[in-house]
Structure formats: C-alpha cells, structure tokens
Amino acid sequence: MINSINSIETQRVPAIRGPIKLPLKIGNSTHNFELKYFEYSGERYAVACLGEVSQDEYIPLRIESACLFGHVFNSDKCDCGFQLKEALKRIAEHKKGMVIYAIDQDARGLGIESHFRIYVMRQHENLDTDELYNRLGSPVDARNYEHVADILQSYNIKKILLMSNNRHRREFLTEKGFQLEIEPIEAPLNFNNMATLMLEKEDLPYDFHFKTHSDWLKSIQEEVDGDLNATVIQIISGTEEVILHSKVLETWNLASEVTKNLTNNDLKSNDSNIIYLTDFPRIDELESYSAIGAKMIVLPFSEIPSWLYNEAEKHKIIIQDWGRKNKYVIERPQWNLLKDYQFMHVYVRGDKTRCVFVGENSNQNMNYLMEGYKNLNTILLGSSPEITHIFEGDCPWFELQQPIGKANGISYNSPDFVLEFLKYNLEEYFVLCPKLNK
C-alpha cells in the first residue's frame, strides 16, 4: 500500500525545466512569452504563459493536444492548426493567458504512429470510427487531464476563461474546483476539414454549431423512406445556406429537373456547393451537377461503387459516403451501373434493368431500339424481358422486367442475361450498334 502511494506521488511530482523567455510571432506582432517544461513519469507538457496570471482574474487558457499534421505540417484536414493560432491570437489580445501543450497526446492520446494508422485506415480501407478504433484496440479519446490540473495549481490559477468546444474538458476542470467561463473556438468548415470535424461532432462531446452531413441527410431521407420511386436533392451553398430542395417521382431524371429550376439562378458562378442526395446519381448527371458548381455529393450509404467514384473524379466532384446513423429504416436498393456504352448506360436493380440514352439524338436512338423491339417475334431462346416503363425527354430511358426461368443455365433475371439480350437486340435493330460495341 505504501509503495502504491509513493508511486502515485512520484507521478504527481514533475520534472520542471525553465522558465525561459521566448518571443512568439502572432499575426504581425511579436509577444514575449514565458515557457516551462513539465514531465510526469514520461508524460510531457510545454506551458506558454503571457503576462501576469492572478488567481483573482479569469485567465484565458487553451489546452492543446499535439498534432503533427496540423501544428507542424499545417494540414487543412483538421482544425488543430487553426485552433492553436486562434488561441494565441486571443491571448495576445487579452495581453495575458496560457497554452498548455500536451506533447504526447497526438491523435487524442494515441501518439503519432497511431495517427498515421488512422489516416491509412480511413483513406485506404474507408473504415468508420467504430471499426477503426476497434482495430486499434483503443478508445476514441484516450486523453487524461489530471496533469493539466496539476500544472494550473502550480501557477495558483483559480479562474479560467477556457477556449474550447470540448465538454469533457469543461466537466473535468469544474470537478477539480476551477471557476470557468467558456469561449468557443471553432474553425470555419471547408471541403478539406468538413468530414473530420463532422465526425468529431457526431462521435465526441464537442459542441460545434454547424450541422453535420447526418443532419442534412436525415431531413431528405424521411421524405423518401419506403418509396423507391421518389428521389430528393438538397443543394447547400458553402455549409449553411439551402439554395434548392427538390423531389421527383417516377421520372428518375433529377439532375435535368434541377438544372431547369436553376436556369435563372446565379449558381453557375458559385464553386462551393454541396449536394445531398437520397440515392446514387446516374453517371450522366454528374456533368450537370458540376456545371452548377457542385464540389461534393453526400450520400447516405457506407459503401459507394467504384464506377461512381471514378466518374465523379473526372468532374472533380468529391463523393462523400455517410452511412453511419443514416441507414434507411426500410432497405433501399440502388440502381447500379452494369454497362457503359458510348450512347447508352445500363443500370440494374434487382430483377429490373434501365437503359439510359445519352448524347445527341438520344430520344431518336431510343425510338429506333423500341421500334425494333416491338417487331421482334422471338428474342434470345424465345424469352424476352418485358418493357415496363418508358421515359421520353432529356436523357430518355426505358425499363425492362426480366422474365422468370433459365436459358442454357443462365437465369433470366441475371445481369448476364440482360447484357446478352441487349447485345442481340442492338445488333439486330440499332443503327448505332457498331459504335455501341466499341
């Protein structure tokens, strides 16, 4: 028991180096800070203090966990660099204040090596938070603030103006008897840091004012849940302003409808729009979305097909998967690209197939195929898919319902049968067949 007490006491008695004087450049001016180094059994902290700190005044305080990416390399993927610079700026304006820099708390206490592993798993394996930290065998936030309280007490500080959005820090310092005032410190959202900060708001006790992708998606998902024929789009300018909200039924031609609605709008000069969709877009729609300034499309699914990522990249659009808490209550199967011909794209969903005609003379080309189809008496071993829906207009399409049964061991409702049928039909009746088969 005595040895345990001595061990605890040893951990609470730091090795201290300093103080030293160090001029810090903040903005366009330089301010003389006093720095100290604290080490508690290998846990290291650097403390930068400006001006006189008094127990009778509220002292501006920023508790900053180390971040190699944000603080050293000035990464725009996180808000760490912004928050440290902003805290120092506010301290300079107050002419007093303190930064406690936790040297060993990179990646919320997991360290630099783990921070690299986290980025690898997010970027290369697309792991979400729970999967990622289960793989690491670590909590999402492994930080401990006991030594922060020890450092503050060593300066005899009683009152704190805490620059933070972290409820855990506030609760901890309050429990330790410090009097608190809170001053939020929030980085502006941009396309680089958006996913990181939104994940933090959803997964951690961080009080950010902005809506997350989950918030934006939830409202439009509720409009279509259980209705496979309905699709909703919501366009946000920047990160907050709703520019357009539209719902279409049956036509499966959302981008065309949106473009018409925005004809007299100034959207084309705005290059910072985010599009929220209830369903996968067609690949021909991405060009339309790019033309109205979309830089990101957010979808309520955890898995996005490669064909969609690849086509979006051509138009410099980010596809952001956001399944997380946005999983549909009723399963919502999606139209997946089966074949990309030059003038026709083939999509499949269950036992249905849709053929979308694109480019010049698209309606005429579809009519050629329809006319030939109607004249056929026997198609591919005596069985042909039934045409269940035809849409004429911009990017026309028709829908086929595959028959039940098999031919030569191939199920009629399999993608192989669909492609064989289309190939046969095109070769017999479609004048553009040579180009389509390239």
Image: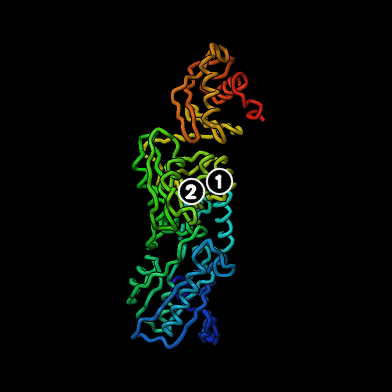
Say which mark, if any, is on residue 297.
2
Instruction: Give the CA separation, mark 1 to mark 2.
Output: 9 Å
Q: State which tag comes first along the sequence, 1 or 2.
A: 2
Residue 144 position (above or below residue 394): below
Residue occupying the point 52% across, 84% down: 29
User: CB atoms at circles 1 and 2 under 8 Å apart?
Assistant: yes
Q: Quadrant of residue 345?
A: top right
Residue occupying the point 45% across, 70% down: 4
Residue 6 seen in the figure:
no
Query: Badge 2 local density, few (<14 within 10 Å), some, or many (20+)?
Result: many
Q: Residue 220: x and y, percent?
A: 37, 45
Q: Quadrant of the C terminus?
A: top right
The residue labelled by disc 1 is 312
Q: Is residue 264 left or right of residue 177?
A: right
- Name the residue nearer the viewer: 170 or 307: 307
Q: Residue 434: x and y, percent?
A: 66, 26
**What amino acid is at disc 2?**
Ile
Q: Residue 257: x and y, percent?
A: 43, 41
Residue occupying the point 50% across, 29% down: 354
Check disc 1 and report its element: helix, strand or loop: helix
Residue 260 position (above or below residue 407): below
**What amino acid is at disc 1?**
Ala
Q: How many marks?
A: 2
Q: Quadrant of the N terminus?
A: bottom left
Say which mark, if any, is on residue 179.
none
